[in-house]
Amino acid sequence: MKYPRLFEPISVGKLDLPNRMVMPAVHLNHTPSGAVTDQIVEFYRTRARGGVGLIIAGGCAIDAWAGGFHMIGIEDDSRIPGLRRLASACKEEGSKVAVQLYMAGAYAHSAFIGRQAISSSTHVSAFTKEEAREMTPEEIRMVIRDYADAAQRAKEAGFDMVEILAAAGYLIPQFLSPVINRRTDEYGGSIENRMRFGVEVIQAVRSRVGADFCIGVRVAGNDFVPGSHTNVESARFAKAAQDAGADWINVTGGWHETRVPQITHDLPPGGYAYLAKGIRQAVSIPVAASNRINTPELAERILRYSMADLVCMARALIADPEFPAKARSGAAESIRKCVACNQKCFDHVFLMRPVGCVVNPLAGNEYRWEVLPAELPGQVLVVGGGPSGCEAACTAAQRGHKVTLVERSAGLGGQTAWWPRVTGKPEFESVPAYYECRLNRLGVEVFLQTDVQDDGFDLGRFDRILVATGARPAPLDVPGADRPNVLQAWDVLQGEGVVGRNVVIIGGGAVGVEAAVALAREGTISPEELYFLMLHGAESVDLLKTLMTRGTRTVRVIEMLPRLGHNIGPSTRWIALKKLKLFGVKAATGITVKEIRDDGVLCASAEGEERLFDADTVVLAVGSRPEDRVYTVLKESFGDRVSLIGDALRPGTVGDAVEQGFLAGLSV
């Protein structure tokens, strides 16, 4: 077997797992009322069928204070029948299944719980921006009892395990952290006292469920909050959790309020496995590593290096529920890889929309969409090999159609074929590679460097033609926009054109921000150079930070809206803006471009005040427009047989394009 450690069975307490892959709890917004729904049952059933060893559903709100908005409810006995249905669905497919016991404390929004949030001490939450009040001793005992009651319900519903959430800045960490906990009683002060609440929760749960039922604890390997716990203190709590009755420790990154990226592409794959290693050295029970583990090779390496005993894969299994089965069968190249974009997972959490996946249109839609054989298989032509065209071709072929795909360029993937390299998002490079593999497996006939209008195609033989020719950059209608020193952001990112040392980027949306960071990084030291200089102590830390963040250009972004990154998702926008500051990019918002001159860009504020921004190169990032010229020609000849999809219909995100392609493939 190619991944022997990954598929090695392991016992966690009295629970035997068939392999070492775990789907950790993730907020899905699939249960608006707290009741188990068809949506969440089919979502988890599909992941269980794919072969993951353990699924942890949740978080599950333990009581009315928990703040589990749109989460699974486990706060009273009325929830048990639905929970039993969820547990049965996973176990029928061969997976072990657990629930995570969730209590947000100060992270609970008062609007969701109908009262003021409670915490270890009175403070204004950096997450909700609301004041939480200190819990009384009676309330501490009440919440501990609520944890135990919830665990008992989980056991009665047929789950194999409960996991106590003691990570990410929720209630138990609010007791652990000296930044939050200012109590003067037995639950505050020394680290032993601050650990007391979490330890008593574990003890109460163990007492309630008995010695043979499995209990896990999810901890922050490092809070990444100034003055709060590091891996050293986290390891002490993990040892105390083991002594209190925990069967395993699940190690994640930091709190939600940290300014250190936790799950985006900025974190290297498996970047927090070192935290699990630190915990593992302090305990004798199994330890799981988490965050950005998205390939079987990486998972196997973490296990083989003894950094952890199990590996957690949340978004990897959202992106491809068949990840375990494909890895086991030797078909890892066909895994649909998570690209760490957050657009349909964590952005949807913040937007209170059901969680889905940019690269997997069926994620979260398993209960309503199914790929069934076509009633009348025919011949389908797809024009365009970007994500929308590739997904349409694959879905149509999966349904039994004979599919031909034509792409004008030398490779598949559209924009995902080039911009990941220059924007620091290498996971997106897996998109064209995945489609190349899938198209080949499905027998789709692919023609590259081919123009469907010029290369002798018998278009009349196709029953349906799907046009997915993407988008092109929008022009800017101001005087001077045609000057030779004016370039499109897309061209610059592909290495075309000569860019000077003093750059003004017009447009502060996602493309403008990405282009600004990419240009500002040029001339900085590489990760390899940094490693060398750090390892040998060749330069001071301050100088190394300067060399990492100051390149050879001065870059400025100007935007007519009042804020930058208006079309960047809420879970990643703060990181994008942070990087602009880190790399010294200047910004001006709320201004309008009036003219591009030889010496710069003339702008005007809302009040009419004019200002000239010096520039030797001007980069346009003012949006895109559909590339629908091929569609117009084909529509005239073939009428209703021709459909327009993806960015060629309406420019949007990669996720929009993939979903449109999938639905087009379902409809032919």
Image (cartoon, rainbow, N blue to C red):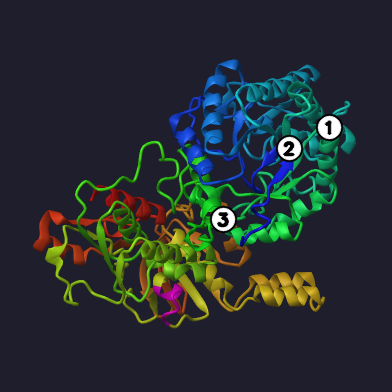
Q: How many marks?
A: 3
Q: Is residue 494 magenta?
A: yes
Element under disc 3: helix
User: To which quarter of the image does residue 505 belong?
Assistant: bottom left
Q: Nearer the viewer, mark 1 or mark 3?
A: 3
Circle 1: element type = helix
In front of the other: 599 or 392: 392
Name the mark nearer the viewer: 3 or 2.
Answer: 3
Residue identifier under label 1: 244
Instruction: Name the kind of residue labelled 1 in the image.
Output: Ala
Residue highlighted by disc 3: 328
Q: Residue at x 52, y 73 (%)?
A: 519
Say whether residue 628 is magenta: no
Disc 3/disc 2 C-alpha distance (Å): 28 Å
Which element type, helix, strand or loop, lies under badge 2? strand
The disc placed on residue 217 is 2
Position of 131 relative to 143 (above/below): below
Left or right placement of residue 21 versus residue 283 in this view: left
Residue visible at 48% across and 29% down in the picture: 32
Q: Earlier in the sequence, mark 1 or mark 3?
A: 1
Query: In the rendered structure, which segment of residues is drawn in magenta?
Result: 491-497
